[in-house]
């Protein structure tokens, strides 16, 4: 009985579609990164072993392409959902709940930097903090440029008819460096911001269960919390 | 008592460390000596001698010495083509000291390898050999190679797989064309072919031609080479850079130079962007984590 009484009150934070898409991204992103970097860093002996586990270089290449298409389907579904959200549900993209970047994000960043150096209080985030917005837009826009450079690398015969030949070399470098950026950003900044923060450690489950605890809601998204209380009152 | 045992223990530890270090040094010295010995052995082993145990498992094992080297006596029977040859003078100063690769007449190879020899004779290496003969000057990559510089007549094995041949080829070509080997291995063709042993990827001769060894400066010739795999390649496709290294930059053609400048500028910019973004956000997140940890620990006190 006690545990049930003490079990924290939770609030719905993420729609089931977004939770599924997040898992789609996790799996495809991981396999894309592994298969891609295994080709790029194939000079080391052990990469050949790992590639042979995937069924050789050819199979690893197809896995890379398959995951890329799968991931992009996820993004297309998300865009369709955005259209549904706007057209059918008649919701607004703007407002404090929005994922669109706004002035508050810039001021939040500076306030956070002041807070880091003990010169102020932490910013009162709304539904999405600026780092969460950055994760979202980094993923959404980064996938577009990764998709474009990836398509160029996948169909060089076609693209050499449109753009100069050495642009394909440039696309190769962009594809690689953006992959490095994505992996090193997601692996360190996204992971520590969501899971490693002392109040959240060891794991943030909201994106998987869709529910957020009252305590976390009040502390991490005080802006949204306040507005919800006002609506309830 | 306590301190005494600790003292003994530390002394023992020091003694052990000393022994391990001495053994290590001894081992290293031994290794160095054995290496040095091996080095001198190789140097004294003139290329004039053939290791018959290796020869017996090579591709040419079925051939008798005379079939390539002649009977080594002017009085011997005529074996068809110019196989009558004098044995080298055993009393000469440079006996067994000259380079066999430079003195053997590799025209003998065309007796069996007609197509390969004809291709070689048309190719870039034969042109370089001619230039070397007329100008008596070596090119920047060294001697113009003949058959024996790339193939070992005595030890080469037959029936190697495409990947085995290709990997050996990358090493062989790379001994003279080091920059090209390096840039090939940095390119996705070389990574897939050599590092991942993918037999559908291109090795040196797949583009440069077996034995013709085209330098691929003429765009039409390049396009032909590309079309062996990329059948839909357009003329602009030939401008994709495979060897994008910047060593010996001045030897490259003007269009390649300007393209390479752009490629490497873009590469540097993207690297700078990646580093800038990561440095900012790593510092941001690291400091924020420390701050939050500090707050949490203070709350717990």
Image: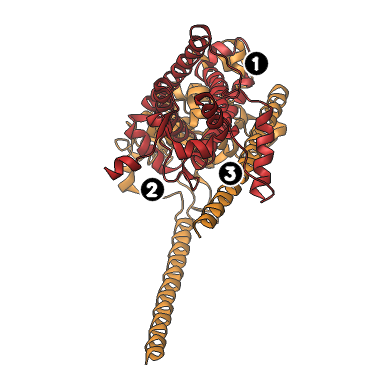
Chain colours: A red, B orange
The verdict on a common chain for dots 3 and 1 is no
Residue located beneath label 1 in the image: A164
Quarter where residue A8 is shown: top left
Check disc 3 and report its element: helix, strand or loop: helix
Residue located beneath label 2 in the image: B50
Say which residue appears at 60% left-offset and 17% top-offset: B238
Say which residue appears at 60% left-offset and 39% top-offset: B143
Quarter where residue B249 is shown: top right
Out of B173 and B47, give the one closest to the viewer: B173
How far, Cα to Cα, is label 2 from label 1?
Answer: 53 Å
Check disc 2 and report its element: helix, strand or loop: loop
Q: Which mark is residue A153?
A: none
Quadrant of the drawing holding the N terminus of chain A:
top left
Mark 3 residue crowding within 10 angstroms, few (<14) / some (14–19) / many (20+): some
Disc on the earlier residue, 2 or 3: 2
Q: Position of residue A136 (x, y in %)?
A: 54, 27
Residue located beneath label 3 in the image: B285
Out of A159 and A114, give the one closest to the viewer: A114
Check disc 1 and report its element: helix, strand or loop: loop
Q: Identify the residue at the far front of this view.
A: A233
């Amino acid at each position: 009985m006690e545990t049930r009484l003490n079990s924290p009150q939770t609030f719905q934070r993420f729609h089931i579609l977004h939770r599924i898409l997040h898992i789609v991204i996790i799996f495809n992103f991981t396999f894309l990164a592994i298969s891609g970097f295994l080709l790029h860093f194939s000079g080391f002996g052990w990469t050949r072993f790992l590639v042979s586990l995937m069924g050789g270089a050819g199979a690893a290449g197809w896995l890379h392409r398959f995951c890329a298409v799968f991931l992009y389907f996820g993004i297309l579904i998300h865009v369709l959902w955005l259209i549904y959200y706007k057209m059918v549900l008649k919701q607004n993209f703007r407002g404090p709940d929005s994922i669109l970047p706004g002035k508050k994000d810039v001021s939040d960043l500076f306030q956070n930097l002041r807070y880091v150096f003990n010169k102020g209080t932490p910013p009162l985030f709304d539904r999405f903090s600026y780092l969460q917005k950055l994760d979202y837009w980094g993923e959404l826009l980064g996938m577009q440029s990764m998709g474009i450079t990836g398509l160029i690398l996948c169909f060089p015969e076609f693209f050499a008819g449109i753009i100069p030949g050495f642009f394909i070399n440039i696309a190769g470098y962009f594809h690689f460096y953006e992959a490095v950026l994505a992996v090193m950003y997601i692996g360190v900044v996204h992971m520590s911001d969501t899971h490693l923060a002392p109040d959240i450690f060891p794991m943030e489950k909201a994106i998987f269960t869709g529910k957020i605890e009252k305590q976390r809601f009040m502390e991490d998204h005080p802006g949204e919390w306040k507005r919800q209380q006002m609506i309830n009152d | 008592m306590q301190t005494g045992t600790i003292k003994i223990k530390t002394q023992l530890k020091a003694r052990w460390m000393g022994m391990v270090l001495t053994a290590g040094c001894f081992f290293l010295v031994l290794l160095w000596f054995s290496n040095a010995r091996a080095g001198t052995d190789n140097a004294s082993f003139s290329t004039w001698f053939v290791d018959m145990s290796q020869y017996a498992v090579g591709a040419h094992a079925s051939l008798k010495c005379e079939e390539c080297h002649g009977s080594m006596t002017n009085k011997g029977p005529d074996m068809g083509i110019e196989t009558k040859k004098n044995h080298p003078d055993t009393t000469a100063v440079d006996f067994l000291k000259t380079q066999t690769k430079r003195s053997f007449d590799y025209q003998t190879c065309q007796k069996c390898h007609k197509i390969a020899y004809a291709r070689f004779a048309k190719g870039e290496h034969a042109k370089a050999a001619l230039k070397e003969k007329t100008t008596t000057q070596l090119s920047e990559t060294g001697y113009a190679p003949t058959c024996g510089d790339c193939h070992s007549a005595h030890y080469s094995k037959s029936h190697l797989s495409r990947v085995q041949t290709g990997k050996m080829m990358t090493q062989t070509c790379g001994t003279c064309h080091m920059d090209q080997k390096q840039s090939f291995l940095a390119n996705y063709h070389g990574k897939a072919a050599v590092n991942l042993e993918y037999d559908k990827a291109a090795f040196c001769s797949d583009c440069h031609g077996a034995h013709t060894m085209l330098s691929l400066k003429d765009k039409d010739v390049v396009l032909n080479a590309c079309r062996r795999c990329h059948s839909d390649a357009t003329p602009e496709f030939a401008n994709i850079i495979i060897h994008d290294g910047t060593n010996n930059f001045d030897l490259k053609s003007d269009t390649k130079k300007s393209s390479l400048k752009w490629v490497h500028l873009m590469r540097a910019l993207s690297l700078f962007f990646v580093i800038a973004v990561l440095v900012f956000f790593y510092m941001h997140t690291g400091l924020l984590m420390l701050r939050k940890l500090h707050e949490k620990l203070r709350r717990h006190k």
